[in-house]
Image (spheres, rainbow, N blue to C red):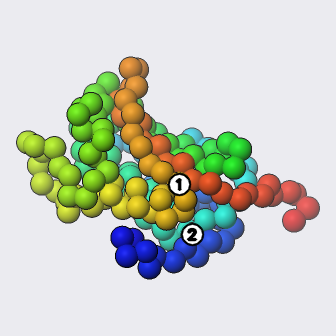
Amino acid sequence: MESRFLKIKREWYDIKELIEQVIDQLNYKSGNHQLVLSASADPPLVFIDFRLMQQTVLNLVNNAIQYTPPQTTFLISAIVEGEQLIITGRMMERKGIFNEDQDKIFNKFFRRAGTAAGGTGLGLSIVKGYAKAHGGRANVENSHFHGAKFIISIPVYFKMISEKE
């Protein structure tokens, strides 16, 4: 990604199907976590690199599983607003991200002091990099009612699927 040799291979995909595949792939690992998808029944097709976006969502959900306590619900939503695909991952618990970590959480190798080592520290960095490769961004914010909310926003072309097609 940093060398700028990453090539985006965009095609038309159903974002809901992409997220469902990620959830199916991680269900074995989720243990006592609950992974929930919230998307419209018939979302528009979006023009994305399926492999990169799948890895983006996989890293986001995997990170949530790794760094939240058992019984945590992780809600994943995908919507198209205007010309933006917005994928949101929300931890449905009161504990969020420490304010001082919000600007660092997407940095390579970042790990909060005192957290158990469990990976390479690249998961969220890859999320940010792949979003950026699509011309978008990734960020995190805390909610007063729930925990952390991760937002991936990328510009997309989209088309509605009609019953005649």
Disc 1 residue crowd, few under 14, some 14–19, many 20+, Cα 10 Å: some
Q: Which kind of residue does numbered mark 1 sit on?
A: Gly
Quadrant location of the N terminus? Answer: bottom left
Residue tagged 2: 49
Q: Quadrant of residue 100?
A: top left
Q: Examine the rendering and report whether any part of residue 109 can be seen.
A: yes
Quadrant location of the C terminus? Answer: bottom right
Q: Earlier in the sequence, mark 1 or mark 2?
A: 2
- Nearest the eye: 63 or 106: 106
- Nearest the eye: 99 or 123: 99
Judged from this view, the residue extending furthest toward the front is 3
Q: Is residue 83 above or below residue 91?
A: below
Specify whether 50 is left or right of 40: left
- Say which mark, if any, is on residue 136: 1
Instruction: State the image coordinates of residue 22 (x, y, percent, origin top left).
Output: 46, 59
Judged from this view, the residue extending furthest toward the left is 114
Disc 2 residue crowd, few under 14, some 14–19, many 20+, Cα 10 Å: some
Instruction: State the image coordinates of residue 105 (x, y, percent, origin top left).
Output: 28, 46
* Inter-mark Cα distance, 1 to 2: 13 Å
Specify whether 154 is left or right of 55: right
Q: Secondary structure at mark 1?
A: loop
